[in-house]
Image (cartoon, rainbow, N blue to C red):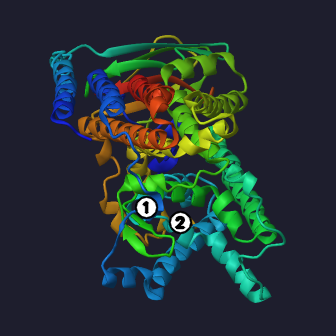
Amino acid sequence: MRTPRRLHLVASLLAIGVTVAACSSDDDSADPSEPGAEAVVIEITEEGGQITPLGETVKVDLGREIRLVVDSDAADELHVHSEPEQSFDVKAANDQEFSFTIDAPGTYEVESHELGVVVVKLQVS
Amino acid sequence: MRHDSTQVFAHGVGGRSDLPIPAEYAFAAAVAALVVSFAVLALAWRSSRFRGDAAGRPVARPIAAVVDSKLARGLVVALALTLAAWVSMAALFGADSLVNPTFGAVYALLWVGLVPAALLFGPIYRLCNPLRWLHRGVCLVARIDPAAGVTSYPARLGLLPAALLLLAFVWLELVDPPVATDLTWVRLWFAVVGVVLLLGATVYGDAWFENADPFEVYSSLVARLSPYGRKSDGTLVVRNPLDNLDGIPPRPGLVGVVSVLLGSTAFDSFRESSRWLRFSQQYSDDATLLNSFTLIGCCLIVLVTFIGASVLVGGIGHARRRDLPNLFAHSLVPIVVGYIVAHYLSFFVSTGITTLQQLGDPLSQGWTLTSWAYRLDKYAVYDHPTALAVAKVVAIVVGHVLGVIAAHDRAVRLLPRSRALVGQLPMLVLMVAYTLTGLWLLFSS
């Protein structure tokens, strides 16, 4: 049985829901993606078969330069699962730099080929 | 050809995948789910409205004639069996690499695709089930009735075999990417399950398929959310999906089936999270074992919490209390479907397109039989993250609302009037918890 009072209550509840939802979507995190912004630097250390970071998430603005700075004591290959896929040869050396950009929104994993682990997840948006 | 398909499976193995849904979407959806839940509890009807298989209007006679015609059904079956044979050929004779269409055909077209197929066309997998046709063919040759087995299927087992085989499938798919994308494992899985299903059908007759075939059981459950159904005399009807859902027979094992479906999808979200990646990569040498336990754990959490909430409903006497989980399990189906849509939408589109392309070259000979599929952009679905996030959130909230309504209607039917409202509280709270967990997983991935 639906009485007018009940309908009124439904309407008010829905209105509350909509209002809360509307308010919450106002505060878009407005970060000015200024051109020529600095690169996002990710430091990667590989030592004795251990790599850091190990599955960290890194947020990156669309199209911003991503720079991997790698210290390693062994040869490895870093795969960025973007399209087309990018792959960097790591040598046993310090301060090796690899730069790239990703122009399409999504989540991409950077993987160590030798160790078979996810080093970082890039959230590009 | 570009071998960008080295990482076909966005899930876990890398490749482009979804961004998390924005916090404000998750929050808005959570608020909507809460408000609607308690609105249903407080304001909805007090005596059951849904009529299950008795509901529905017969469809216009010419349409029913076409749908029921041997020709139309034969064409659909022929198409499905051809596709199954084509994929089997690729699985048996194609290259053991990710360019083989078998993986996409199994994990995207079959496993995820059966959901939209069932929503749009009803229990179509049952009609096309290749194993049913194989069994029928053998019976025809041997001149035995496919429905007759050595003995009749024990009703107390219900959907238990399907629940176990579904768990076996999600294990294959989710527990370890190198397993999921190793052709040997996939062949072995289908060989073993095929033998189990055919042997079972020999013993119990073809009733075995509707209780044990994981894909048929899944498809037939989801088909209960489609607007079509049949009356007990076979008349094709159009009916309210909620009436349709109400007609799911409460069988033993039903709660197990929905627990595996919901738990495994949650596990798939969870294992992609940074938190889990850091933990599992750091502390475990044996990712397969760890993931196996976690997958089973996720399914068990759903099972135990659902049984717990159902038993708390109470109010119908001790003898029937143990029937309660299966009497309410149908109401989880929309929540499962909503969550699966949210979780697999982009994967289905992008991997589906890749698979269509690969199906043109099943034996890795460089054929391009499906050259039209190369005109589809498999990444387009990721290029509109806002639309994708909205679609996911809407799917979750709609699934939640339908689930809550279905549970409410069942509660007011089963429980005495005095207990109807209080009795459904545990179930409502649990559904809210499932939905909020789902949103949290999509938000924090």
| Number of numbered markers | 2
Q: Residue B184 falls in which quadrant of the image? A: bottom right
Q: Which residue occupies 33% across, 74% down?
A: B59
Q: Measure how far apart labels 1 and 2 are at the Cα level.
A: 8 Å
Does residue B147 sit above or below B211 in this rendering? below
Q: Taking B25 as reference, is B183 left or right?
A: right
How far across and down, in percent of the image, does residue A5 sit?
17, 30
Does residue B9 sit above or below B364 in this rendering? above
Q: Nearer the viewer, residue B363 or B393?
A: B393
The reply to whether discs 1 and 2 touch (Cβ–Cβ < 8 Å) is: yes
Residue B239 appears in the picture as rendered: yes
Can you identify the residue that label 1 sits on? B117
Can you identify the residue that label 2 sits on? B125
Residue A100 appears in the picture as rendered: no
Q: Chain of mark 2?
A: B
The 10 Å Cα crowd at callout 2, few under 14, some 14 to 19, many 20 or more, is many
How far across and down, in percent of the image, does residue B65 sit?
38, 85
How far across and down, in percent of the image, does residue A70 sit?
49, 15
Judged from the image, the secondary structure of the residue bearing numbered disc 2 is: helix
For the C terminus of chain B, give its image quadrant.
top left
Q: Which residue occupies 74% across, 71% down?
A: B205
Does residue A58 sit above or below A110 in this rendering? above
Q: Chain of mark 1?
A: B
Q: Taking B410 as reference, is B201 left or right?
A: right
Callout 2 amino acid: Tyr
How far across and down, in percent of the image, does residue B28 sit?
27, 25
Q: Taking B254 as reference, is A44 left or right?
A: left
Does residue B276 sit above or below B83 in this rendering? above
